[in-house]
């Protein structure tokens, strides 16, 4: 089997993987392996925005409280503190790299989403925030000659020797390669595709969690799956996400009899936390024996709706749903996994030299229920922190040998017997 040696191996090219790569690029050679095109990720499809306490009416402490409240008392408070405190710096840095968030006049335009008590969600291109993040981060990554990208390179398993992670087995062009690395960072995103209804792209199959579990890493909070309340539910249409920001801008939920119902479930009505809205929708669907409820934006200014949600407007129109003039059939769909590979606040997992960041990881920052728009921020903040942690470790760790040299990591073949489930 071929072997390749790098300083840092990053698996996944969403927000977390790219941000980690940027942190590591000045300090060694970095390989970013990703199983599809570099942009194909949940990050690319993120619509609503990215939460950050930067508006005049907001404070880091209020973002902290809102995150804890949404997390149902199960958040790791240290992880939340880091998220909200380091978030503003990560966003300003992103803007300095060329990110263009929507503005009102000369000021950044912050919107409100469910369970946020202040306007704090930045957005780009109306409802294409993730695309803008991927664009900027990929451009930044391209500026470092030390970063190599392997698209269509599927990571199958980790290479574990003497209890340490020494890299990963990667399938590319039908050939298995053992990539040897001083530090390996899993940034493989979520697992929505294990559900029949999901907003997640095809790449979100939980590979990182499975790979880590097979290698003996600890997973945590795997039972906490967030269901997004409003995904398009129409016979021939994809399960397309209808952003929370639509309710933030005033959209109303109605049952199949066209009656608004959210006030019966929570005082914040449409802006209650996601888990409450999803459960309310399911209750109404059961009560009315229907496969969906409706999202109604018809009372909002048509031009505003088209401008604010251009991608959602044009996608729905393709399936004969005009969101400016008709009711939109919606139902909940699996959206985000709060659990994942257990890490500390620096992305350190229970296996030496293995790190994890982004949706695949579980720092406990989201508790039992993620606050809307906190996960892109998580990718930036924890991607950067995990990069720094891997760097510190690399300073103390032995240098991996280059191709052709004899190596402490001799790997003769891919050990298929490895696929036994370890006992915990
Ligand atoms: C439709 C949608 C809308 C969303 N809207 C928002 C929003 O507005 N705001 C917000 O904060 N969050 C939003 N989210 C959630 C957010 O987008 C994700 O949680 C976040 O982008 C995850 O980033 P990540 O870097 O951890 O993973 P991802 O962006 O999913 O990237 C994972 C990467 O890993 C690669 N990969 C996976 N398995 C393997 C393997 N075996 N081998 C090699 N590569 C692999 C994938 O190809 C991909 O490149 C949304 C999610 C979806 C699906």
Image (spheres, helix red, strand yellow):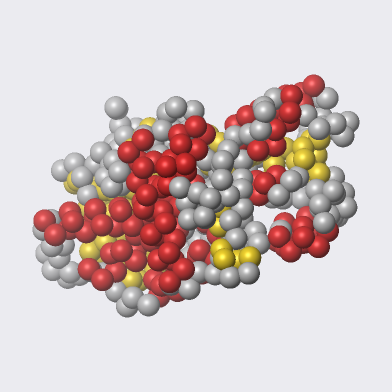
Q: Is residue 39 above or below residue 50?
A: below
Residue 284 percent across, percent down from the top left: 77, 26
Residue 175 percent across, percent down from the top left: 38, 62
**Residue 78 occupies quadrant:** top left
Residue 375 visible in the shown view: no
**Residue at the spot 49% in from the left edge and 32% down from the top edge:** 69
Disc count in the image?
Answer: 0
Q: Is residue 203 above or below residue 91?
A: above
**Residue 273 occupies quadrant:** top right
> Which one is nearer the viewer's eye here, 227 or 235?
227
Q: Is residue 258 above or below residue 396?
A: above
Q: Is residue 8 left or right of residue 313?
A: left
Residue 141 percent across, percent down from the top left: 39, 71
**Residue at the spot 42% in from the left edge and 47% down from the top edge:** 60
**Residue at the spot 52% in from the left edge and 40% down from the top edge:** 371
**Residue at the spot 53% in from the left edge and 50% down from the top edge:** 57
The C terminus - image quarter: top left
The N terminus - image quarter: bottom left
Residue 45 percent across, percent down from the top left: 59, 57
Q: Residue furthest top?
A: 287
Q: Is residue 282 above or below residue 386?
A: above
Q: Is residue 343 left or right of residue 203?
A: left
Q: Residue furthest front?
A: 56
Residue 217 visible in the shown view: yes
């Amino acid at each position: 089997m071929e072997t390749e040696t790098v300083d840092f191996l990053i698996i996944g090219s969403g927000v977390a993987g790219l941000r980690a790569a940027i942190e590591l690029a000045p300090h060694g050679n970095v390989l970013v392996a990703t199983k599809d095109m570099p942009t194909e990720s949940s990050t690319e499809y993120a619509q609503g925005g990215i939460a950050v306490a930067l508006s005049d009416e907001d404070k880091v402490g209020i973002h902290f409280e809102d995150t804890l409240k949404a997390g149902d008392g199960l958040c790791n408070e240290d992880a939340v503190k880091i998220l909200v405190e380091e978030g503003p710096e990560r966003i300003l840095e992103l803007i300095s790299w060329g990110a263009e968030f929507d503005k009102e006049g000369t000021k950044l335009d912050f919107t409100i989403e469910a369970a946020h008590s202040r306007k704090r969600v930045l957005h780009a291109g109306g409802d294409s925030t993730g695309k803008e993040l991927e664009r900027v981060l990929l451009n930044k990554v391209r500026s470092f000659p030390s970063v190599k990208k392997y698209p269509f390179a599927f990571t199958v398993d980790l290479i574990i020797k003497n209890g340490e992670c020494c890299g990963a087995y990667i399938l590319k062009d039908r050939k298995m390669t053992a990539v040897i690395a001083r530090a390996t960072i899993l940034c493989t995103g979520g697992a929505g595709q294990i559900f029949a209804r999901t907003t997640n792209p095809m790449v979100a199959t939980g590979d990182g969690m499975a790979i880590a579990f097979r290698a003996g890493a600890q997973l945590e909070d795997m039972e906490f799956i967030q269901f997004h309340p409003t995904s398009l539910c129409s016979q021939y249409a994809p399960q397309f996400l209808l952003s929370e920001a639509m309710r933030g801008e005033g959209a109303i939920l109605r049952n199949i009899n066209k009656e608004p119902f959210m006030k019966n479930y929570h005082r914040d009505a449409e802006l209650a936390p996601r888990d409450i809205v999803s459960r309310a929708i399911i209750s109404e669907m059961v009560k009315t024996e229907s496969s969906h409820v409706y999202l109604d934006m018809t009372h909002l200014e048509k031009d505003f709706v088209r401008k604010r949600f251009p991608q959602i407007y044009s996608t729905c129109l393709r399936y004969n749903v005009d969101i400016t003039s008709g009711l939109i059939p919606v139902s909940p769909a699996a959206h985000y996994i709060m659990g994942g590979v257990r890490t500390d606040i620096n992305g350190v997992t229970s296996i030496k030299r293995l790190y994890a960041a982004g949706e695949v990881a579980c720092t406990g920052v989201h508790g039992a229920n993620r606050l809307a728009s906190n996960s892109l921020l998580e990718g930036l903040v924890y991607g950067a922190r995990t990069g720094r942690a891997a760097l510190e470790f690399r300073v103390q760790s032995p240098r991996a040998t280059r191709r052709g040299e004899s190596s402490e990591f001799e790997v003769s073949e891919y050990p298929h017997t490895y696929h036994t489930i370890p006992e915990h």
